[in-house]
Image: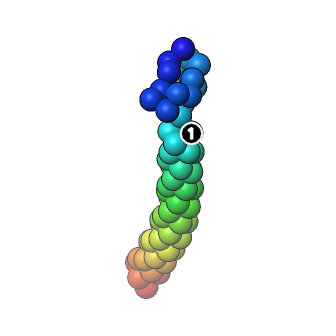
Amino acid sequence: MVRRLSGHRLEPGQHAPFRTAQKLVWQHHQQEAESLFAHDLATLSALTNSHSLALLSVSVVLTMDEKLVKRL
């Protein structure tokens, strides 16, 4: 057992109220950052997928154009 300057006793594993509050604030910030990162990653993934589909479409059209030109 630890006796603090204020006279309050802390059992092993207990934290001062300020330290507990500080830990909760840090956990909240970490969760918020993880949520924002996941959202940004999903947005980037969607943009990349649509960009890939657009490139694939252009590639197919160009390939079809080449085949038509060869037939003529």
Q: Position of residue 12 (x, y in %)?
A: 56, 17
Residue closer to the observer: 23 or 68? 23
Q: Is residue 35 above or below residue 49?
A: above
Residue 64 visible here: no
Residue closer to the observer: 37 or 65? 37
Secondary structure beneath label 1: helix
Residue closer to the observer: 34 or 1? 1
Residue 33 visible here: yes
Q: Position of residue 40 (x, y in %)?
A: 50, 62
Q: Is residue 9 above or below residue 20?
A: above
Q: Residue furthest bottom?
A: 72
Residue closer to the observer: 54 or 59? 54
Q: Choose top left, top right, bottom left or bottom right for residue 72.
A: bottom left
Q: Is residue 14 above or below residue 70?
A: above
What's the residue at 59%, 19% (across, down)? 11
Q: How many marks?
A: 1
What's the residue at 46%, 76% (across, down)? 58
Q: Position of residue 50 (x, y in %)?
A: 53, 70
Identify residue for label 1.
17
- The kind of residue on which mark 1 rests is Pro
